[in-house]
Amino acid sequence: MTTIARFAPSPTGRLHVGNIRTALHNWMLARQSGGQFVLRIDDTDAERSKEEYVEAIRTDLAWLGLSPDSEARQSLRLDSYEAAFAQLKESGRVYPAYETAQELELKRKIQLGRGLPPTYDRAALSLSEDERAAKEAEGIAPHWRFKLDHDAPITWEDGVRGAQKFEPAQLSDPVIRRADGSWLYMLPSTVDDISMGITDVLRGEDHVSNTAVQIQMFEAMGAVAPRFAHEALLIGKEGKLSKRLGSLGCDAFRERGIEPEAVIALLSRLGTSLPVEPIAERATLLESFDLSTFGRAPAKFDDAELDRVNTALVHALDFADVADRLPEGIDEAGWHAVRPNISTVGEVAEWWRLVTGPIDACEFTDEDRAYLADALAALTWGDDPWGALTSALKEQTGRKGKQLFLPLRQALTGMNHGPDMGELLPLIGEEEARARLSKAAG
Ligand code: GLU
């Protein structure tokens, strides 16, 4: 059976690093086996869902290279939910309830006060026909609950958590539809998973108890439930569910100069028993992707780790990978010269300035000025002007180490450190190098 996995964000905000991780893992699950990766926009909440977020989700997935094979949208599928609802009502698996939010809250408080779990007491199920009619005559519109079957435990083999078991009597019959007719998450998601032929649901462990309920929904609608896997949540390195992570997404990564491949390399392995490595090839990451390596403990996201992976990946980028993002005039040799000194591609400009100029002026002692005048006289322009210059000066002046190199670097680049001079000098060019040495020599 071909794997069909889905990523089902609610467009009520931008994707954050936790959502990105779930999207990636679903993409990997599908790509690993030549399956399908579906983007499902969970936009039944008309008030909170925004078109700009739908657009942003598409843009972010494209930036990450996680393009879906198809896209579905819950707001365009309301008829299917209506049909499923009618069928479940008909078969007695959905019932109307009339309690107000305040009444429910009070019931919960009483249960908790008695040390009981705050599950819904199903009072609405025992209303007579007349009592219901009376409520409706009072103008109280019902909300709707799915009636859980209490006969047998709900079990499944979770791809990450192993054998799972829930006693349905300990769960509340979930509200699936509000009094105004709008849908809550639970039923539409199940209806869609059935009609899209979803084979694998991989999502955060905050959905574990939803899965128990949804398994009964699949069965109530005569469908076979997909495989389920729930990954441990992502937390900040300080060990908490952090607010910052909840707002950290592709825009922030891009602004920081993080390559999409760094995000992918880190998030594909974070929280698994596999080492996080700067792997740029998705095929390699896909080969090792395996739910059985996923741990149960929360995965810790650390910015410094992302930066490290990013730097390592940037150092391995070829000129062709970055050519369209480099400053005007920089060629392959220029890229190779500055690449070891950067941790983001954006930093190239700072170093490339050392080639194009103008450079900062440095202060030199009289002795160094004389040395730089010697350097100007000794400069020849062959295959390796830096090697030739420094060998000649070493011989001629007896200088070595820092004394030999630093005044030259300062005169030629205006800085105390930077890219390898052997690579930089040919890029600066003879004329400009002479001009810089001459200026520094005074
Ligand atoms: N829209 C739900 C969420 O973002 C989808 C959960 C699921 O994958 O079923 O939490």
Image (cartoon, rainbow, N blue to C red):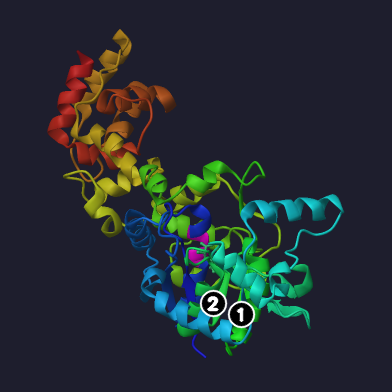
> The residue tagged with tag 1: helix, strand or loop?
helix
Q: State yes or no: discs 1 and 2 in contact (Cβ < 8 Å).
A: yes
Q: In the picture provided, is 51 more to the left or to the right than 258?
A: left
Extreme-left residue of the structure: 431
Residue 143 location, quadrant = bottom right
Residue highlighted by disc 1: 217
Q: Residue at x 40, y 51 (%)?
A: 250
Q: In the rendered image, which residue does mark 2 sit on? A: 190
Give x and y (percent) for residue 336.
31, 49
Q: Nearer the viewer, residue 28 or 339?
A: 28
Report the amino acid beneath label 2: Thr
Number of labels in the image equals 2
Whether residue 130 is visible to the viewer of this picture, yes or no, is: yes
Q: Quadrant of residue 349?
A: top left
Give the image location of residue 225, x and y in percent: 60, 83
In this view, 378 is above or below 34: above
Q: Main secondary structure of the magenta part?
A: helix
Residue 317 sits inside the magenta stretch: no
